[in-house]
Image (tube, rainbow, N blue to C red):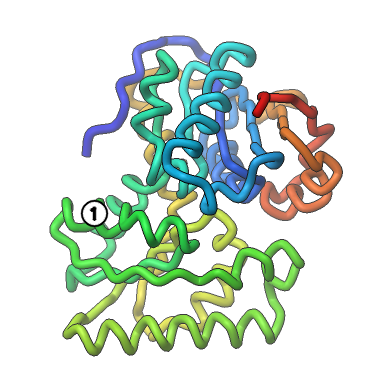
Amino acid sequence: MSYPEWKTGTTTPTIGVFDSGFGGLTVLRALVARLPGARFAFLGDTARLPYGSKSRRTIARYAAQSAQFLVNQQGAEFLVIACNTASALALDAIQDAVPVPVLGVIEPGAEAARAASRTGDVLVIATGATVESHAYAAACRARGLRALEKACPLLVPLVEEGWTDHKVTAEVLRIYLNELNAEAVAQGMNPDTLVLGCTHYPLLRPLIERAVPAGMRVIDSAEAAAEAAALLFNGRAQVSNEAARPGQVRCFATDSVEKFERLGSRFLNQPTGKVELIDLGG
């Protein structure tokens, strides 16, 4: 597939990562693991979430403001949109707003599904806004796949409650996946791949892998996006292989920095450090 063009030869690029909240820290975690020599600036627009309840125009405006902050004030030379809703509804607006390459999470997730699936039938679980956009279905269809999407609105609050290995969460997952598989059978599909279309869902991956039918591949769109970024950098720029140093990751939020610091460490799998409060306006 075609990814954004990357031209700089710097050995320590600055990568901006944007999400409407802090779930996108799972994307940042995957990026740090693959590009430890880069600098990262992560912004969670926590004052204005959830994006899913907003209009496309408002989402585009919010996302463009966040992208401009990362590029103009933090010097980001490349952006990863670690938000499925913004990737689905505002990627073009973000690309128009900043003069740097921009990578979303949906196209890499669909590409990974194509590589994994043998039957050509794919299931997608995501938030309501992402499912309503049908962005994953469109990206899969462009790759010759049939995709069936399902909104799973209870999963995000369960993850944020910390119930990532709880019997209630396991039961909710079982119900959602049974409904999705039953609908797939009713449509004559033979799915062999499940795409996690929300950046909160990687924290549920062990439960999900136990709940899916034997042999079904689970695709983490956060990992897929990080892999796409790493391939892009390794092919076009010389990124240092040195281990990440303290200060190489800076986190910003537009509200609720204490909650960000408390919950964010679960997503990043390490302390977020001091989260800096910023104001992007209305």
Give the residue drawn at x 39%, y 61%. 131
Front in this rendered view, residue 52 or 120: 52
- If the image is split into quadrants, where does the N terminus sit? top left
Q: Position of residue 193 (x, y in %)?
A: 32, 70
User: Which residue does the numbered mark 1 point to in the structure image?
Assistant: 138
Give the residue drawn at x 79%, y 33%. 275
Say above or below: 163 vs 43.
below
Residue 201 appears in the rendering: yes
Say above or below: 250 vs 54.
above
Q: Position of residue 12 (x, y in %)?
A: 56, 16
Front in this rendered view, residue 31 or 267: 267
Front in this rendered view, residue 252 or 153: 153
- If the image is split into quadrants, where does the C terminus sit? top right
Which amino acid, mark 1? Ala
Q: Is residue 276 left or right of residue 227?
A: right
Q: Position of residue 206 (x, y in %)?
A: 57, 72
Q: Is residue 164 left or right of residue 207?
A: right
Q: Residue furthest left?
A: 144
